[in-house]
Image: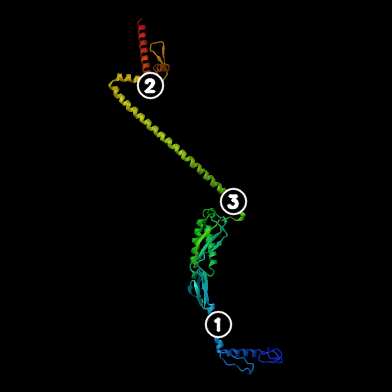
Amino acid sequence: MAWNEPGGNNQDPWGGRKKNDGPPDLDEALKKFQDKINGLFGGKSGNSSGGGGSASLSPAVLGVGLLIALLAYLLFGIYQLDEKEQAVVLRLGKFHSIVGPGLHWNPKFIDRVYIVNTTEERSHLARGFMITEDISIVELPVTVQYNISNIQSFVLNVRDPENSLKQATESALRHVVGSTKLDPVLSEGRQQIAFEVEERLQDYLNAYGAGIQIVNVNVQQGAPPIEVKAAFDDVVKAKEDRERLINESERYANAVVPEAEGRAARIREEANGYREKVIAQAEGEAERFTQLLAEYSKAPEVTRERLYIDAIESVMSNSSKVMVDVEGGNNMLFLPLDKIVNQTGVASGSSGDNLSQDVVREIQQRVSDELRRNQINNGRRGVR
């Protein structure tokens, strides 16, 4: 039955005190609990009827407590690293080792472990207003991608590596932009700026010993301050118009210059051809005259007659009408060569080109006969 039920003698579980004896004694309850523990581990029970002095703990209890504390110490020192992580171990504040992925243990309060993700590619965005070489203000955002190349240097050499990276990025960017004009910063020169910033930033981090490797620097599109954006847009538009006009003029020049050069080359070729023709004709005439002179020396009369006939033939072939003035006569002889040629051509049924030589010879013969008759008539008049 329960200790407080009727017939239970009103005894409580704290040592058989009666209900009327007052509240239980805490020291006595602790002593009884200690006696039970000692009985479980083979210890001797204390005197329950003794005074209220506290009993000392037995070696068995101390051993159990130490064992529990040791197990807790060992369990709390266990940690695990995944494939992306490495850890720097400091023992008593001094570098001890670098551990890789897996299950590890370190003694608490003796070793300190700094776990870092070494394979993750990190990024940092820097932006701000900067002054270019031609004293123009521009806002240029830059993204820096980096990873950790040396975990020991990253953890131990610099107190705050990422803050150092931020400051070094701003310093390198301002140095490069400050030595570059505005146009390259906003247009085609961004790739060169990114290359120079990456090189200078890596030099800074190597000097710090930060253990950071720069992977890529990406310079984004820059922009002027909002306060001067309208004026800046006008300048950009004017530059675009200038480039457009230059391109149009170059396109026109590329179309006109080759044509002019072609005409000039054609004129030069024609002039050279004309020169060669004139020279050849002159040389031919000179050679013909030399040969004619040799023939004239051999037979002057025949040669003169031949030259005269050739000259008359040349003149007659280019003239349609001939006026002949007879020496000593009063009348002038008119010869309509065009009509004579037409009549002769119709009578013979041949073409004008084939009859030209024959017609000329016939005309020459008629002219000669007419001249002889005039001379004979003039001679007869003189005799009378």
Please, which residue is most extreme toward the top here? 384
Residue 233 tag number: 3
What residue sits right under mark 2 in the picture? Answer: 354
| Label 3 SS | helix
In front: label 3 or label 1: 1
Q: Could you give the CA–CA distance between mark 3 and mark 1, rounded to whole angstroms?
A: 74 Å
The kind of residue on which mark 1 rests is Ala
Q: Residue at x 50, y 74 (%)?
A: 103
Query: Would residue 191 be visible to someone looking at this image?
Result: yes
Q: Residue at x 46, y 40 (%)?
A: 258
The kind of residue on which mark 3 rests is Asp
Q: Nearer the viewer, residue 97 or 6?
A: 6
Query: Would residue 157 be visible to someone looking at this image?
Result: no
- The number of callouts visible is 3
2 or 3: tag closer to the N-terminus? 3
What residue sits right under mark 1 in the picture? Answer: 69
Q: Residue 152 location in percent, x, y?
A: 49, 71
Is 240 located above or below residue 118 in the figure? above
The kind of residue on which mark 2 rests is Asn
